[in-house]
Every structure is written in C-alpha cells, then in structure tokens.
Image (tube, rainbow, N blue to C red):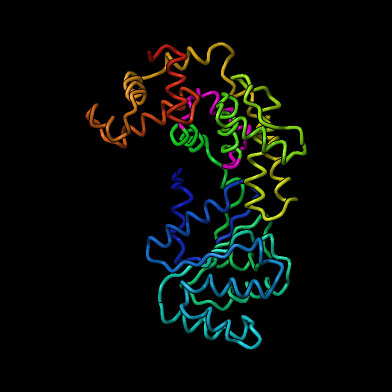
Amino acid sequence: MVFRLRLEDCVDRFDKLRLAVLSGPAGIGKTTLLARWHTIAGNRGMAAGWLSLHRSGHDYGHFLNDLGNALEPVAPGFAGYLRAMQAPALSGALPALLSGLDRTGKTAVLFLDDYEAVSDPAIHRDVNLLLSALPRQVMLAVASRVEPPFPLARLRACGGLLELQASDLRFTLDEARYYLTRVQALDLTEDQVRDVTRKTEGRISGLQMAVLTRRLMTGERNALPEAHHRAGGWLGHPDAGPCGDLPGRTDREMVLRGFAAVMVGYAAGAAGDLEAAMAQCRDAIEISGKVLETLQPEPGKQASQAADGLHHREIQILRLVSEGLRNRQIGERLRISEDTVKWYLKRLFAKLYVTTRTSAVARGRELGLLP
C-alpha cells in the first residue's frame, strides 16, 4: 500500500464540504482513493456508506435498493423503510432519511463510485435531491470518468466543493519510486523509475501493469504456462496449449499475450461486460509495450547482477530456506524478527526474479550460491 498523504489528508475537510468529485480516465486511481477515504472516514468515527453504480446506474429500482443498503450505516433503518414503501421513491422517503440522520448526529459520507455508468435521469434527479436536502454534517464523495451533472458552479462559489482531476490523481515521481522500489521491491535505477513514471503518465493501473510486465519478462516459469493458456482462450488462439518447453526468457509476443490474458481476466471481473474488459485489455497492451524496453534487464547481465546485488543477510536466508526452515525458524536462527525475514525475502525474490521459495532455491543453485 502507498500512503499518499497529500490526497488522504483531504478527509480533514469533509466536515466543511458538501461534495467531493474525483474525475479522470479509467485507471487513474479514482476508486483506489475513494476506498482509502472510506476506510479513513470509518476509522475516524464517521458514518460511511458505499454504493458502486456500475450495475445499478441504468435501473432506478435497482438503484433505490442499493442506495437504501448503502445509507444503512449512515441512517439505520432507512433501507427497511424504503423497501416497505408501496411505490418506492427517494422524494417520499426523504423525511425518514433526514430523521435517521438527525438521530445519529455523526458526520457522514456517502461514497458513489462509477458514476459515469448512470444513464437513468431519475437517478441524477435523486442524487441532486440528496445534495440539496441533506443536513450540513452529511456530504457526498463521487468518482466518475466524466463531470457529473451537479450544480458544481454554485458549490464552488460557496466553498463546499472539492475537485480532484487526473492531474491531481497521477502518481508523483516520489510516489511512483516508493511504489516500484519499496512496495513492489523492484530493483530499478533512478532513470528507469523516471522513465516508467513518464511512460505510464503516473497512472496507478499503468504502474501495476509495469510491475506485472517486469515479472513476466523475467521468465517466471510457474506463471508463464498458465499465462500462455489463458491468453489463447481470451485472445482467440485456440491452438495455445500447455508450453512447458518455454525457454527461460520470454519474447515480446509472449510477454504481451500473457500480460493481456491477466488483464482481461481482471478487467472482465471488475467491469462486468466484455466490451469494457477488452478496452482495458487494449490499454494494458499499449502500456506494457511502452515500458517493455525500460524494464528489460540487459542481455547476459541478469544472472550476474542478481548474484552480485545480494546482501549477505539475503544469502544467509536463502541458504536457510534451502534447508527447509520457515520464516519463524529463520528468525530464531539469525536472531531477527519474523517481519524482518519477510522483508529480506521480498527483496531476495525481486533480485532473483522469482515468486516462490522453491524457485528461489533453484535460482540460487544456478548462480552457485547454494550447493
């Protein structure tokens, strides 16, 4: 996890706002930040409700049901009241909602994600009704790919609006450096970090794609056959089958096909429809192609750089792993904490370009670090 204080500190202003709008293209980090705000608000004792509109934005009845459930932490009992109405409508249920909010007396936030999916005018009407009718201690936080149809000019004029656009949500160089080298433990030079940040335009999805591209490029044998198989299914290559005879290093086509398969699988689960999934897949291929050259280790130097770059403690831990010791046992043997062992293992895996203990031991033997 990357803590981006410049954005997370916006929660400090929630008691003075009516609306926060996060807008920008897919993959810029809107949902990630919205979810982080939701967690922080809950930890600070605020009542927080969450509603994702990617499935209910086109169906008013579905929206009302989801809205009632989302508002339950904010106004307990409101969901049941809404369901009991003969002809459910927010305008008719508004007095019950306001009464429930008065009883809690808490600062409350309703988070609305994927607002660009709203196509029913009645939903826009109801959200605008909430904006105008909710008491001062309640605000809305909305994430959308396009500017939502709210009275933004009036809210700006009275100081009740927080707007964060793509330029605000992009990772700065410092944030990207921390994510790539500390969180993901990639062994990158400063020039590589700058280049990847520039080519991905600071988009968190792009940085995540860059990390996955690097993993696939370094020939992790356990991942490649599955990636190849999934690529064949998703990208229309029925002849793509098991490929246990793959060489240790991957070529550009294999990297992009395997990468695309992973991204399509993820996107389809998140997007809910194949068209959106394929759009995200095309984006994934474009970004992975951009960062491919930047992240590729120089030919012939990968093994020697891995061996030369290992810390003596990492070599000690690798040898104990090869003896079958678990993290707790390694910590006891070396008189360090189990968390410290995990930290060294993460760095060790990144330097050896592996993801499992078994692969690390095998790579260690290849490099002559183990008998």
Residue 304: x %, y % from top left: 48, 12
The N terminus, quarter of image: top left
Residue at screen point 60% across, 24% down: 294
Quadrant of res 85: bottom right
Q: Is residue 209 magenta?
A: no
Asked whether residue 74 appears in the rendered view, the answer is: yes
The C terminus, quarter of image: top left
Q: Is residue 187 magenta?
A: yes
Asked whether residue 159 appears in the rendered view, the answer is: no
Residue at screen point 57% across, 37% down: 207
The vertical placement of 139 against 267, above or below, is below
The vertical placement of 102 against 319, above or below, is below
Front-most of residues 202 and 317? 317
Residue 316: x %, y % from top left: 31, 21
Front-most of residues 260 and 156? 260
Residue 237 shown left or right of residue 224 in the figure: right
The vertical placement of 259 against 29, above or below, is above
Residue 190: x %, y % from top left: 50, 24
Residue 274: x %, y % from top left: 73, 51
Q: Which residues are magenta?
A: 185-205
